Amino acid sequence: MKKVILGSAMFLAGLISTALLLSGSMANEWTINGEFSSFWNLSKYGLFPFFCTFILVAIAGLAVAIWGIIEKE
């Protein structure tokens, strides 16, 4: 049960962090050929490694939660 709670918290933290980075990068008015690009903004500010890290935290949290559900005690 502890693994499920830890994994769920990690997944939620990674998901919220990713959403905040994506929405924050679109707050600027920068465009590419008239279209908004959040990934370009992330790379412009050097935040793309953090984006990848937050995605990995979300994936790891999901894996821990699933492992906690499947594991038999």
Image: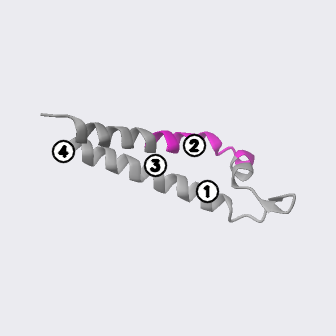
The residues bearing labels 4 and 3 have C-alpha atoms spaced at a distance of: 20 Å
Labelled disc at residue 50: 2
Read off the residue under disc 4.
Answer: 1
Main SS, magenta residues: helix
Which quadrant: the C terminus? top left
**Label 1: how many residues lie within 10 Å, few (<14), some (14-19) or many (20+)?**
some
Q: Which residues are magenta?
A: 43-57
Read off the residue under disc 1.
Answer: 22
Q: Amino acid at mark 2?
A: Phe
Q: Amino acid at mark 3?
A: Gly
Q: Nearer the viewer, mark 2 or mark 3?
A: 3
Who's the residue at 26% across and 45% down the image?
4
Residue 35 in the figure: left or right of residue 14: right
- Under circle 4, the secondary element is loop
Who's the residue at 41% across and 38% down the image?
60
Read off the residue under disc 3.
Answer: 14
Q: Nearer the viewer, mark 1 or mark 4?
A: 4
The residues bearing labels 1 and 4 have C-alpha atoms spaced at a distance of: 32 Å
The residues bearing labels 4 and 2 have C-alpha atoms spaced at a distance of: 29 Å
Residue 39 sits above or below residue 63 on the image? below
